[in-house]
Amino acid sequence: MDEALLQVRDLRVEIGGVTILDGVSFDVRAGEILGIVGESGSGKSVTALALMGLLPRARVRGMVRFEGQDLLTLPKREWERVRGRRIAMIFQDPMTAFLPVRTIGAQIDEQIRWHSGVGRKEARARTVRLLGDMGVPAPENAAMRYPHQLSGGLRQRAMIAMALSCEPSLLIADEPTTALDVTVQAQILSLLRDVTGRGASVMLITHDMGVVAQTCLRTLVLYGGVVLEEGQAGPLLDDPWHPYTRALLASMPRLEGELPERLSVIPGQPPSPASRPDGCVFAPRCSFIQEGCERRPALVGHGEREVACVLYPA
């Protein structure tokens, strides 16, 4: 479990001269689900797209080592062999992953044939089997339907089936339960947990700390394009160290205990990438601001926890 399938070091992404990610580092270990959390605009989806090589107009620097290869040095042809085959992605909206003018089955078939080199009949058999494994009823019929003919939950299952069609080692899931009802959400999360039973690792991007608590082994807290805290999901959620992590958890509605008159909110807005503070990126919204916050704190290890805050010096 300690083996790192993916190592990301000092990942920096610039788009149009503006820094979106500023030195992000983390590992995804074999067979685990790593949760990446933070508000909208924190850099979560940009991280995923950078790892997939889907930011052609961006300047991406750092190291992204996957299965012994630094992905940032791969030529385009090599990337085509990795993307979809060894690393796959579940997008937030399934309609962005499927062409509306082709059937679900045809699109999954095509990916299987492209990466595996099998014939049409074998590809279709694998497609139907995968759809069935993902809980799609009457998978033979579903494979012949167009994306708009399936419900949101079934489209999401079909997209997971397509992502798993070539048995990737790493599955990146970007907000896979957004806009789904709680029953379907629970089913999708169960499917993601099952993925690790197939030997794959999952990087789950979400803004929902409840999803992290149900699903993830470790959690990475991202804000303003930098990592503020990382550690085992249970201890981190039970006892958050960084003021931002505390604020995120305090703003979540809870079912147990006495209900507050109003939910806690984090004052202000996340920083624009074009005007990120020079010091701690969370300082303008932090209630614990003190001397030293004008300098950007390093991410410091404390046992199995890492945190970037002057409250927890080296």
Image: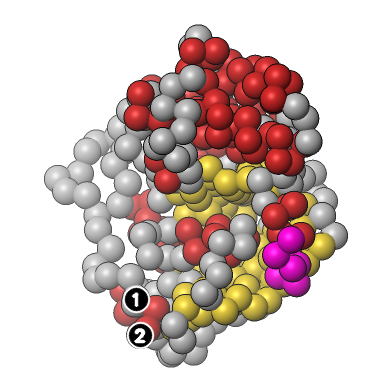
* Relative vertical location of residue 60 with respect to residue 257 in this rendering, above or below: below
Q: Which mark is residue 275?
A: 2
Residue pictured at 75% horizontal, 72% vertical = 73
The reply to whether dot 2 and dot 1 touch (C-beta < 8 Å) is: yes
Q: Dot 2, crowdedness within 10 Å: few (<14), some or many (≥20)?
A: few
The answer, for residue 100, to whether it is visible in the render is yes
Residue sitting nearer the eye, 310 or 205: 205
Q: Main secondary structure of the magenta part?
A: helix
**Front residue (pair 8, 87):** 87
Label 1 packing within 10 angstroms: few (<14), some (14-19), many (20+)? some
- Label 2 secondary element: helix
For the point 35% across and 24% down, the residue is: 149
Q: Is residue 145 left or right of residue 61?
A: left
Label 1 belongs to which residue? 271
Left or right of 125? Residue 137 is left
Q: Amino acid at mark 2?
A: Ser
